[in-house]
Amino acid sequence: MTSIQDNIRGKIAIVTGASSGLGESTARHLAARGAKVVLAARRVDRLDAVVAEIRAAGGEAMAVATDVSKRADLERLAAATIEAFGRIDVLVNNAGVMPLSPIDKLKVDEWDRTIDVNIKGVLYGIAAVLPRMKAQGSGHIVNISSIAGFKVFTPIGTVYSATKYAVRAISEGLRVEVGNSGVRVTIVSPGAVDSELKFNTTDPDAAAGVNAFYEANQIPADSVARAIVYAVEQPADVDINEVVLRPVSQEF
Ligand SMILES: NC(=O)c1ccc[n+]([C@@H]2O[C@H](COP(=O)([O-])OP(=O)(O)OC[C@H]3O[C@@H](n4cnc5c(N)ncnc54)[C@H](OP(=O)(O)O)[C@@H]3O)[C@@H](O)[C@H]2O)c1
């Protein structure tokens, strides 16, 4: 039987949205398994605190201030990773927002932000690492979709769902396009997970429903981090294409 215990050790992994929730937990899990982790988000004070804890535990990590809605920031993030560690083995495209409301509330600024972070941010991340990964002949891009990428989350999550369907389409297209280049692509689609995401909703009626739904169902962020670790630790010739996970109690 092949041991995969050490497959993550020494890998250089970028995690976007690593200042809280799934991204923070994923960065901690990958670091604990021996990856050198680059944590990206806008709240650098939060990133610095996580980096300090990873280092105190004997791991290697650094923080890079990044707004994923700005392509130049992702390019800087990739360049900083190369400068520090010489290669990029894993990108976890995790940064995301979820301000929920019915379409007829016309919260168009929130639609724009959701599209900019959840779709363009993922594409900018891919653009920043793909040439390097293809040149290396190896790499792994893990994109975070959602159960809302399988079911349209009406009546408050139509735009959010649209972005998460898009993440699945982009990921599946990318997987086919990269072919036999050595680059692996994984989609991770969680259900309700305890994080700051449930507090993004500004519409009071929608927020009440979201909070009740999360209170009734949410599971810890490390349930998703473990799924990401599972995909990353596979041997180089195995691509976990898709992981879908829900709280046991969640029907939607
Ligand atoms: N929690 C769930 O129930 C759930 C379920 C399915 C899928 N997801 C997905 O999981 C991912 C992580 O969400 P989470 O639940 O962990 O939520 P979270 O705790 O709110 O974390 C979101 C992360 O994204 C970052 N972010 C937001 N806008 C950004 C921007 N413009 N540039 C860079 N980073 C940005 C935030 O950092 P800064 O604010 O510091 O920039 C934060 O680190 C998202 O893609 C979300 O859609 C979550």
Image (cartoon, grey):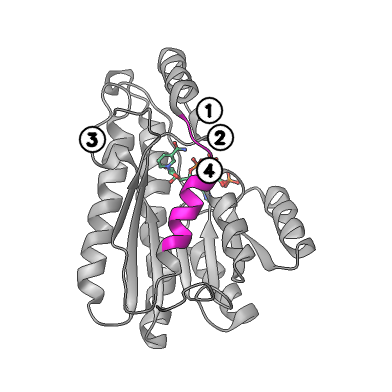
**Ligand 1 closer than 8 Å to label 1 CB:** yes
Start and end of the magenta stretch? 218-230
Q: State if disc 4 and disc 3 touch (CB < 8 Å).
A: no
Q: Nearer the viewer, residue 155 or 22?
A: 22
Q: Tell me where residue 220 appears, x and y as whole percent.
A: 53, 39
Q: Residue at x 31, y 44 (%)?
A: 164
Mark 2, residue position: 196
The circle on residue 126 is none
Q: Secondary structure at mark 2?
A: loop
Q: State if disc 3 and disc 2 touch (CB < 8 Å).
A: no
Q: Is residue 71 visible?
A: no
Mark 4, residue position: 221
Q: Is residue 67 above or below residue 126?
A: above
Q: Secondary structure at mark 1?
A: helix
Q: Nearer the viewer, residue 99 or 183?
A: 183
Mark 1, residue position: 199
Mark 3, residue position: 151
Q: State if disc 1 and disc 2 touch (CB < 8 Å).
A: yes
Q: State if disc 2 and disc 4 touch (CB < 8 Å).
A: no
Q: Most extreme residue toward the front, as rendered? A: 1
Q: CA distance from mark 2 to mark 1?
A: 6 Å
Q: Tell me where residue 187 appears, x and y as whole percent.
A: 33, 56
Whichever of callouts 3 and 1 sits on the residue coming sooner in the sequence is 3
